[in-house]
Image: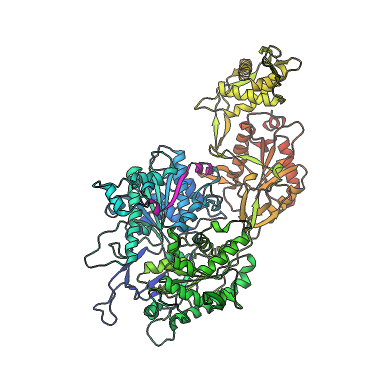
Amino acid sequence: MTGTIENPILNSPYEQPDRYYEIGPQGPTGEIKDGRRPSESFIPIAITKKGKAQFQQGAFDFDATGERREKNTLINEIRRDIAKWRRGGDYAGVTPITRKLLQHWADSKRENRVIFAQREAAETAIFLTEVAGRTHGYTDWRKRLEPQNKAHNDALPRAALKMATGSGKTVVMAMLIAWQTLNKVQSPRDARFTNRFLIVAPGITIRDRLRVLLPEDPENYYDLRDLIPTDLKGGLEHARIVITNYHAFQLKDAKEIRGVAKNTRLLLKGDRKEDAFRETPQAMVSRVLRDLGTDKQQIVVFNDEAHHCYQDRPIPAGEKLDADEKNANEEARVWFKGLQAIAKHVGIKQVFDLSATPFYLKGSGYNEGYIFPWTVSDFSLMDAIESGIVKVPRTPVNDDADHELVTYLRLWDFVGDKLPKRAAKGKVDHWLPPPELEGALRSLHRSYEKAFAHWESELKQYGETPPVFIVVCPNTVVSKLVYDWIAGEQVTEDGEVIAHKPGNLALLSNVVDGQPLPRPRTILIDSAQLESGEGMKADFKQAAGAEIAAFKAEYRRRNPGADVEKITDDELLREVMNTVGKKDKLGEQVRCVVSVSMLTEGWDANTVTHILGVRAFRSQLLCEQVVGRGLRRRSYAVNDDGHFEAEYANVYGIPFQFISSDKPIKDPLPPKPVQQVAALEGREHLRITFPKLTGYRVELPDEEIWLDLDAATVFEIGPNTVPRWVEMQGVVGSGERERGEDRVYRPKEVAFALAKRVLDTNFNTVDDKRPWLFPRLVGMCKDWIEQRVFLADGYDLGYLMTITEAQAEAAEKVWDAITRLADRRGRLRPMLNRFDPQGSTGDVDFPTRKATVPTEKSEVSHVTLDGKDGNTWEQLLAAELELNPNVVAYVKNDHLGFTIPYVHKGRTHSYFPDFLVRLKRSEDEEFDRTLIVEVSGSQKSPGPTQAKATTARDSWCASVNNHGGFGRWGYVEMTNPLEFKTRLAEAIQLLYDDAPIIGDPDLLDFQTESLRSARGA
C-alpha cells in the first residue's frame, strides 16, 4: 500500500461505476482512473520462499496466499456489449414486457431505486437470452459458454453472475423470476421463457430467507423493492416456485428399510444393480418438484451460493484431501447430480448461478480460486466498495512489534500452533489466550467501544440495534474457550453452580455484577451443525446450555402461553443466529457472535463492525467469504453528492488487503424516521377506485344503435309466469310453505343484467369485444322496462333475475326493438390491463422517509410530499382538498399504481399525476365523478409536459368516460398556488358540467349541453 485513501467511495450506487482506484504492485496506489474497473481474478501460484525467489513476478502477488491477478476476458467483452446495448435506454431486441421491466428498473426518479449491481446482473442474463446472437451488432456469447459447460458441467446450461456479498443477489433472482414469468404469460409459446422455477440453497438459513421470492409472501421483494410496474403485477401470480436446499437431492430410503441392519439390506439387494429400497433419481425429482405441477415446461434453476455446486475431477496422484475438502466434494456431487437428474427427467432451460465467489474450491481437482469459466458478469468487492454498496473492510497495515509481519493481520502465524486441536481430557480452568490473540481481542474491543458509543448517542434513539463483533474460530474447542473468555462462565463445584465469572470484555460480557444477564450479549454458534438440520452434537449443546436456557426464558416472555418445549434447542439457536441485528427479534440485542468455522452463508446482519479471524486463511477466496459476513451496510441514506457515506468493518486476523485508511471516520448519516403510509380501517367509505390502462385504441364501429319503443311489444309478468311461492305437504304430517325470494330488485339492476345478456349474445365475439356499448344498452333496457314491461298486482321484476329463460326472452324482446344505422365516426376505447384492470386506495401500504402530511378525507393515512424537503405546493393543495365541501375523498398518487400511458418522441412512457379527487355526487346521478389533478410546480422535472397533459385529458379521460363503467373523469393542472382555491372550485364545476375537461368532445361517445356548446353546435 503506497498511501492512504480518505474516501473510498467514488461512484453512485445507482449508476455504472465510471472511476476506480488503481492497484499497483503493493496494492491500491490512491490514483483514480477513469472508466470501469476490469474484471479480474486472483489465480493461485506457488508460494515463493522469502529471499530465495528465482525470478521477479511481474503481476501483483499476494504474499499471504501466493496468488496473482488475471483479467477475465469473457466477462469484460460481454460487459462492453451490454454497455452499448444499455445506452439510450431503448434495449434493442427485447420483448415489450422485457423493455418495460428494464426501463422500470433503470428509472432514476424512483424512490426505491434498483442499484446498478443488481441491474447489471439481470441485464446480463436478459441480454444473453434475448439479444446475443439474435440482434444485429451483438455477438452470440452463448457459443463461448457452450464448450465450457460441456467440459465442466456435463452440458448443463449454466451462467454464473458474480456479485459481491451484500450487493443484492436475492433481488436479482426476483427480477429474473418476474422477467421470465411475465414474458411467459404474455407469450405462452415463446420457448425462451418459463414460469416454473427451482431455487436451490446450500442450507436452511438461506432457504428460509429466500421465501421473499414467493409472490404470496407478505415481505416479498417484488412489492418491497417495487420490482414490477403496477400494471404488470397481476401476471406474477402465474409463477410457480420451489425453494429447497440441495440436501433434498439426496436419494431417500423407503420407510420399510429404515432401521434394517446393513448386512440384511445387502442380502435383500442380492445381485441387483439398483437398490429397490432406495428412491430412484426420477422419484427424487418428482418429490422435489411436486409443487410445480405436471406441466411439461422446462424449468429455470437458481443456484444460490453456487460455488458449492460443481463437478469435481480426479485428484492428482499423491495429493491427499482433508476431511473438510472431502465433505465439500461430496456435497457438491449431491447438488450437481440432483441438477443432472432434473435435466434428464424434466428439462432445464437455464441454470443461473449466483455467488460472490464463483470459484472452484480446494480439493475439487482444480486450483482453488479458479473462476468458473461460465461466469458472465462480475460486480466485484472492489466495485462494491468504490460504489459504497458494502462496508469497507479495514485491515491492519502496520504496528510497532519488532518483526516483519503485521501482527493482527497475520494473527494465525503467531497463535496457530498454540491453540488446541481437540478437547482436553480434563476440564480446562483459567485458560489464558496466547498474548497475540488476547492483544487482538482487547484491541478490537477498544475499537468496538467507539462504535458502541456512537450507536448509543446517534442511532439508538431511532430504534437501531447495537453494533456486532464476530469471532471466527477453527474448531469447537477453541470457540468454547474464546467464548468463555469473552462472555464469562459458570463456576461449578461438585456439579453445582456456585458463582458466575464475568467475561474479560466489558461490553460483551454475559455476566454483570456477578449475575448472568437475562438476555445474553454474546452467543456461541456452530453454524455448520445448525445448517444441516440434523441437530446439534451433545458437546455443543452442553457448551451453549446457558444461552439456550436464557433464550427460552426470553421466548416465554415474548410469547405468553406458548409451549416453548415444542421448540428444539437447535431451532431456537438458529432463530437467534438469523435475527442478530433485527429489531423485535430474539437476536436483536446480541453484540458478539463466536462462531465455529465460518458463519453460515446467507447470514445477513447489517450491523457488524468488527471481525476477528482466529484460523488459517490460505486464499483470497476464503478471506472474502469470511469478511463478506460483515460487509452489509447499515444505512442507505445518500449524501448531497448522491453517494453513500463510507461505512467500515474493522478486520483482524484475515490477510485481506483492500483500501486502508488512517483518516478519521465520518459518521454515517442517521436514517430518517420511517412513516408507514397505508389505507386505514374504518375509512372504506373514502375509497377511490380507478382503471388501469395499458393504452388506447380507436375503433370504427359499423353501425349506430337506438331503441324503437313504438315497435316493441309488451312483456307481461303475472299469474301466467312461474309461481311466487310453493306449499308442500305429505300424505301425513305437517306441511311446508316455500315463500320464494324476499329480495326486491331495482329496475337498474335488472337493466344491467339484460344489457349484459344483449351484449354477450348479439355484439361480443371471441375476437371482438365491445364493452363500450354496455352503458348505452343499460339505458335502452331501463327505458324498455319502464315503458314495455307490465307487472300484475303483487308481482315484481325479480322474475327476470331468477328465471334464466325469462331473462333470455326479455333480452330477445329488447334486441328486436333495437334499430341500427351505419356510422363511421371513430371511437376512442381504453385498453385495460388484462391481469389487473382496476386499482384502489385500499391497496396502499408502504413505508417512506419522505415528508408526509396526515389526512382526514382520504382512505390513505398520509399525503407524501415529493422533493428533498417536501413540496409546499402539494401540501397547500392537500389543505384545499380537505376544506372543499364538494370533495368527498382524495389521495396522493404515491404507491397507488395509477398511471397514464403516453407517447413522446415515439416511445411509450408512464405519467404519474399527483392527486385523484372524488367529488360529491349530484342528486340525480348514480356514478362517481373523479378529478385528476397535476401540481406543476418549479420542482417538477422539465419532461414532455404537454404530451402528458394532452394525453391525460383527451385520451385517458375520453376513453375511460366512453367505457362508462368507471364513472366520469376530468383532468386539470394547478400551476399557481395563489389560485389553488379558485382554480379547484372552477375545475370541480367544469367536471359537474361535463365541460371539455372530461376529454375532446369529438372523441366522446355521449353528448351534453356543455359539449355541444364546446363543439359550436
Side of 870 relative to 322 (left or right)? right
Residue 959 lies in magenta, yes or no?
no
Which residue is nearer to you in this view: 427 or 486? 427
Q: Residue at x 47, y 49 (%)?
A: 102
Q: Quadrant of residue 161?
A: bottom left
Tell me if residue 1008 comes above or below residue 102 in the rendering.
Answer: above
Image quadrant assignment for residue 1004: top right
In the displayed orientation, state which residue is furthest to the bottom. 402
* Relative depth, front residue between 679 and 603: 603
Instruction: Pinpoint residue 409: horizontal percent, then vertical percent.
Output: 42, 77
Q: Residue at x 50, y 80 (%)?
A: 442
- Tell me: 368 left or right of 1006: left
Q: Nearer the viewer, residue 370 or 965?
A: 370
Q: Point out the image quarter for the N terminus.
A: bottom left
Q: In the rendered view, does 259 fall on the left or right side of 877?
A: left
Q: Quadrant of the C terminus?
A: top right
- Is residue 249 magenta-colored? yes
Q: Is residue 141 visible?
A: no
Q: Which residues are magenta?
A: 232-250
Q: As displayed, is residue 327 above or below residue 297? A: below
- Spot occupied by residue 220 in the image (x, y as percentages of width and height): 53, 51
